[in-house]
Amino acid sequence: MRYAHVERPHAAHEVTLGALLAGVAASLLCACAPADVKQSNARPDVVLISLDTLRSDHLSAYGYERPTSPNFDRLAQQGVLFEAAHAPASNTAPSHMSFFTGLDPHAHGVHPVTASHAAADARQPVTSLHPDLPTLPEVLQAQGWSTTGLLDDGFLLKSMGFERGFDRVHNKRTTLIEKLDKLEGFLQRWDRDEPQFLFFHTYEPHSPYLPPRKYHGKFTQADYNGEFRMRYERLLDVPLKSAWNAKGHFLDSKGLPEADSVEFLRGLYDEGIAHTDWGLGELWRLWSEHRDASNTLFVIVSDHGEGFGEHGHLGHSYGLRIELLRVPLLMIGPGLTPGRVSDPVGLVELMPTMLELLGLPAVPSSGPSFAPLARFQPQESGRAVHSQFGRLNGVDDSITLNGLRLLRTESRAGVKLALFDLSADPYEANDLAAARSQSVQSMLQLLDRRRAEAQSWRDNYPAGNGSTLSKEDEEDLRALGYLGEDQ
Ligand SMILES: [Zn+2]
């Protein structure tokens, strides 16, 4: 059972962040670090790179037919590539807060600000992480890492808790090129002997897919002259900020557009990925010039995918469809042997996994780690992978176990269950729930247990919602398409 190894506090006031972090420090003193972890002054740097909205099957290393990702593919040869990593949720804030806490989205309660959560006067409340729940940057900071956040604003707001634990933060919407310039400035100033933690987040792959012009036409059809071509070209002549302000509406469509439009959008998305991949290569180059890349734990990940009509939708944040859950995960670092892991893993477990790889104990609020898989150590079969997605009228849950995925969707219309065989039907076209009711029932029990655990954490450590968005934040979120939608 997920949290069986930790003592659940009975009330929020019984455990504080300080106490949790003190527990981490005390555990370190018990010499529990694995033998292969470098100690004290040889502590590795840590780089967590989140490439927002990047579905894994659009990368060549995951079998994509277009050459979108030469840099990622090259790095994949040097590290552990997880072939089946599932995002915690299909939207930015819940997924990233799960990366940072090891908690399910429903447990930490940091959710998207949508019309469903809006105050009556249309000023939007922001949910913020409970102050006693530790985040990855806080844990690393408490353990002596110097911590830097290069964030892309939008949904990773200070008021939500995303800037906690950073010694320095740059949280501003910029191009990828500007962000890399900022990183180079940091790298030039950092003490070489001090272990660094960098969290690098970019919205570059997000719609409306606006890489520099040299990428235009790389994967899109020159003879397409439909509605989305016109929308796109209108964006190219306006400043970046204005273009971002059109993001939320770029994919708007009554029903799914015609196939040629969807194909054009897929091409635009791939052009954005190609630019993002260039940025990844640049980041690697800069890091290698200024730091010891061989003594750095790199984790490259995304928070959710992007739909192109597989289940009737464009974009993301429309539930837990498989095209939104499959994201890349690549780990490169000291003690890790290059290879591929086929077992599914849940990125809710990213934080405890990173802490274990660094020789640090997990915090009590996080779940199990998949570090043994990263080390290719023998594992018991039957490892379950979970995702959750909050809606106005309920919570969607997903569990993947032994090649099957059960999806429970809650809405005003009631609860719907769907079961898919991922090996035979990787894009989930055939619902087997009616035919395999026994599997549904057994997986449903696990889902219910998981939801109850999440609810318990949510009850003990409720997310705050006392603050409101600034006008600027509200505009940014509207630009990303997260305001005014009931999902
Ligand atoms: Zn996102």
Image (cartoon, rainbow, N blue to C red):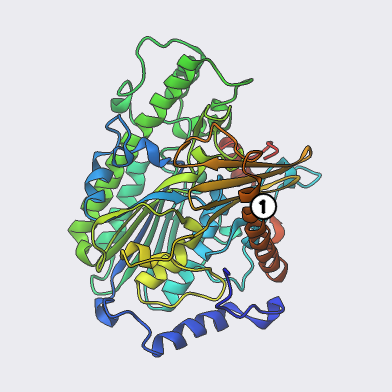
Q: Looking at the image, which residue is at 72% across and 78% down?
A: 11
Q: Position of residue 298 (x, y in %)?
A: 31, 59
In the picture as drawn, the residue positioned furthest to the left comes out as 289
Mark 1 residue crowding within 10 angstroms, few (<14) / some (14–19) / many (20+)? few
Q: Looking at the image, which residue is at 52% across and 35% down?
A: 428
Q: Position of residue 313 (x, y in %)?
A: 57, 29
- Residue kind at label 1, given as amino acid type: Gln
33 vs 174: above or below: below
In the picture as drawn, the residue positioned furthest to the right comes out as 120
For disc 1, the marked residue is: 441
Q: How many marks?
A: 1
Q: Looking at the image, which residue is at 60% across and 38% down?
A: 432
* Residue in front for this viewpoint, 178 or 367: 367
Q: Position of residue 291 (x, y in %)?
A: 22, 63
Q: Position of residue 481 (x, y in %)?
A: 59, 36
52 vs 309: above or below: below
* Residue in front for this viewpoint, 471 or 328: 328
Question: Which image quadrant for residue 219?
Answer: top left
* Residue in front for this viewpoint, 208 or 265: 265
Tell me, yes or no, if residue 465 can be seen here: yes
Q: In the drawing, does residue 61 fall left or right of residue 476? A: left
* Secondary structure under the numbered disc 1 in the rendered image: helix
